[in-house]
Amino acid sequence: MKKINDRFLGIFPLLALVLFRSGQYALAGESAEQSFNNSLEATAKKTGHADVSKSLGTDLPDMIGNVIQWILSFMGVIFLVLLIYGGFKWFMARGNDSEVQKATEIIKNAVTGIVIIVAAYAITVFVGSIITT
């Protein structure tokens, strides 16, 4: 069992690196962000409004990216708190099997949750890169 865990811990970082770096390709043409901003500015000019990207203070895709970054950071903090809580509960179980089982369940659920979140983000980035090309 220890060999399987060691092998998994060796393969997991490599797999994560491949998944997260696969969506970053060099594009010869205009990026999706530039295309979106250009069409937004053209529409604003046709309707007689000021430059939309300047009036917002930043580009809309940048704002959306910042919101997603804050949400993912908050979820990371929640994961860390649950992991510490589960470890503390396990530490304080003092050999009580039911308490140890509850603590391991908390840790398993926290790890499962963060894996689902990271996988959903990776899938979204991958699909987004396919759609925009």
Image (tube, rainbow, N blue to C red):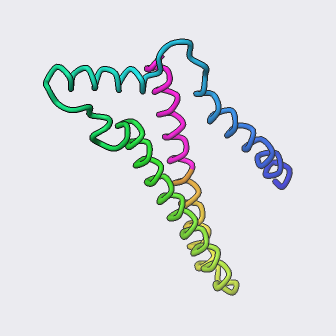
Question: Residue at 70% across / 84% down in the picture?
Answer: 95
Q: Residue furthest left?
A: 47
Q: Position of residue 48 (x, y in %)?
A: 14, 26
Q: Which of the pair 81/36 is nearer the observer?
A: 36
Magenta span: chief secondary structure? helix
Question: Residue at 45% across / 54% down in the picture?
Answer: 70
Above or below — where is 107 with respect to 31? below
Above or below — where is 54 with respect to 5? above
Q: Which of the pair 9/38 is nearer the observer?
A: 38
Does residue 81 show up magenta in the picture? no
Above or below — where is 8 with respect to 17? below
Q: Position of residue 11 (x, y in %)?
A: 77, 41
Left or right for 42, reference 59: left
Question: Residue at 56% across / 73% down in the picture?
Answer: 102
Q: Which of the pair 23/49 is nearer the observer?
A: 49
Left or right for 101, reference 52: right
